[in-house]
Amino acid sequence: MDDQRELQPIVVCRDVHKWYGNFEALKGISMEVKLTEVVVIFGPSGSGKSTFIRTINRLEEHQQGDIIVDGIELGHDVRDIEKIRMETGMVFQQFNLFPHLSVMQNIILAPMRVRKWSKDKSEEIAMQLLERVGIPEQAYKYPAQLSGGQQQRVAMARALAMQPKVMLFDEPTSALDPEMIKEVLDVMVELAESGMTMLVVTHEMGFARGVADRMFFFDEGLIVESGTPKQIFNDPQEDRTKLFLSQILQH
């Protein structure tokens, strides 16, 4: 990859607005994310974090502003939306695995259908990814036979199987029991350290402190403050950021 390409942000959001009826959920969000950067988005419930991350691959449609992923502008052209979805892996709060398919079948479905890979190639990559997330022995089980933490790691392997350029995480640990959170965060830390570009909506401040390049604090559909973890944790500038951190860091 040439240096010029390295310098170009892979995700560009400019003045992004989103309404639900009369309610404005996003009030002009602007953010650029470079290749290999890890961005953590945090804030109270209802602040627009999940809505924002879901606009990046058109799970939610924005009504105003620009979203550009890997040089492709997100408009109404279905082909562009499909291209962007091929390059952005998504991991949700709920694992969204197909219950009637085995772990292996869940992972190889999209690569075979969308990337048009052979079954052999898809299965080989799936096994490598299951090794990477630490559960190769679960390949032929069904989701209901797995713990929540294991299901979330399968969901991560499934997203990675498409070999995306960007990974989006929407509160990936919030539905998990406390003892399972670490096993999922460990995989996310490894991903970040391997150079994956990541946008992560999370309340896991230890993860943010350890892995994020930048953090964005959302409240009421706005970015209230952004900075490095050091700036945000040691010297937050805005009262709303200070209040939120004081509440969340006590727990």
Image (spheres, grey):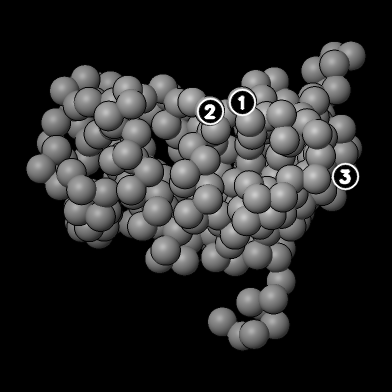
Estimate the x, y position of residue 132 in percent, counting from the top left: 25, 55
Residue type beneath disc 3: Asp
10 Å neighbourhood of mark 1: few (<14), some, or many (≥20)? few
Q: Do the residues under discs 3 and 2 have CB atoms within 8 angstroms? A: no
Which of disc 1 and disc 3 is earlier in sequence?
A: 3
> Pointer 3: residues within 10 angstroms few (<14), some, or many (20+)?
some
Report the residue at 34% width, 34% height from top: 181
x and y percentages locating residue 246 in the rendered image: 63, 31
Say which residue label 1 marks.
247
Circle on res. 149 = none
Instruction: Name the residue located 80 percent from the left edge and 18 percent from the top edge.
Output: 20
Q: Amino acid at mark 2?
A: Gln
Residue 195 seen by the camera? yes
Q: Counting residues from the N terminus, which is met first, the one under dot 3 or under dot 2?
A: 3
Gap in angstroms between the C-alphas marked 3 and 1: 29 Å
Q: Residue at x 61, y 85 (%)?
A: 2
CA separation in Å, label 3 and label 2: 34 Å
Which residue, given by chain and number where applicable, does mark 3 sit on?
A: 15
Percent position of residue 197, x then y: 54, 59
In the image, farthest residue toward the top: 22
Whole-Å distance between the Cαs marked 1 and 2?
6 Å
